[in-house]
Amino acid sequence: MMKKVSSAILAVVLLFCFLACTAFAVEPRWTNTASISPNISSSTYYATVTGVSGTTKIACTLVLSQKGLFGTYSEVARTSETYYGNPHTFSGSYVVSSGKTYKIDVTAVVTSNGTSETATSSFVKSF
């Protein structure tokens, strides 16, 4: 009897997990933006922004921040650029310090088929 109850509970939990994961996987994150791929190297911070078919303009701001002693981030560099086309890699220069953690925040306004949307992404990397 106990074995049947345990099996039934396990089956319900697995079914719920499957349905929840499937629901989240189907929903697109953005309408006009296919992807944002941020990264940080030892001297450059950058993000490749790709719009969907019909994208005519991408305006992007990159903010690079350094993690401080108490876990808060402080801005150390920023760059903004507008590109007429699709896709494009936006970048800025900054020499990072060894032993520090950096975060890049990307804000892209992607115009496609006459409508614009704002898409955001973040990336953290330690050196």
Image: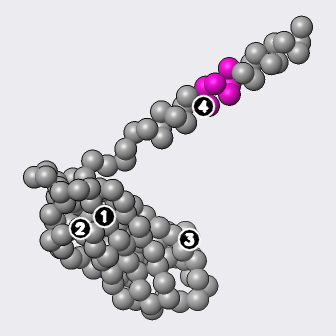
Residue lying at 43% horizontally and 38% vertically, measured from the top left: 26
Calculate the distance from the C-alpha at mark 3 to the C-alpha at mark 4: 39 Å
Residue lying at 62% horizontally and 31% vertically, measured from the top left: 17
Crowding near the residue tagged with mark 2, few <14, some 14–19, many ≥20 C-alpha atoms within 10 Å: many
Q: Are marks 1 and 2 in contact (CB under 8 Å)?
A: yes
Mark 1 is on which residue type? Thr
Magenta stretch: dominant secondary structure: helix
- The quarter of the picture where residue 60 lies is bottom left
Q: Nearer the viewer, mark 3 or mark 4?
A: 4
Residue lying at 58% horizontally and 77% vertically, measured from the top left: 126
Q: As displayed, is residue 17 above or below residue 54? A: above
Provide the residue designation for mark 1: 50
SS type, badge 2: loop
Q: Which residues are magenta?
A: 12-18
SS type, badge 3: loop
Q: Are marks 3 and 1 in contact (CB under 8 Å)?
A: no
Could you say where residue 93 lies in the image, as x and y percent from the top left?
Answer: 36, 88
Crowding near the residue tagged with mark 1, few <14, some 14–19, many ≥20 C-alpha atoms within 10 Å: many
Closer to the camera, 75 or 20? Answer: 20
User: What is the number of the mark on residue 70?
Assistant: 3
Provide the residue designation for mark 4: 18
Residue lying at 61% horizontally and 25% vertically, measured from the top left: 16
Q: Is residue 14 magenta?
A: yes
Q: Nearer the viewer, mark 3 or mark 1?
A: 1
Crowding near the residue tagged with mark 4, few <14, some 14–19, many ≥20 C-alpha atoms within 10 Å: few
SS type, badge 1: strand
Which mark is first along the chain, 2 or 4?
4
Mark 2 is on which residue type? Asn
> Quick one: quadrant of the N terminus?
top right
Q: Is residue 69 left or right of residue 59?
A: right
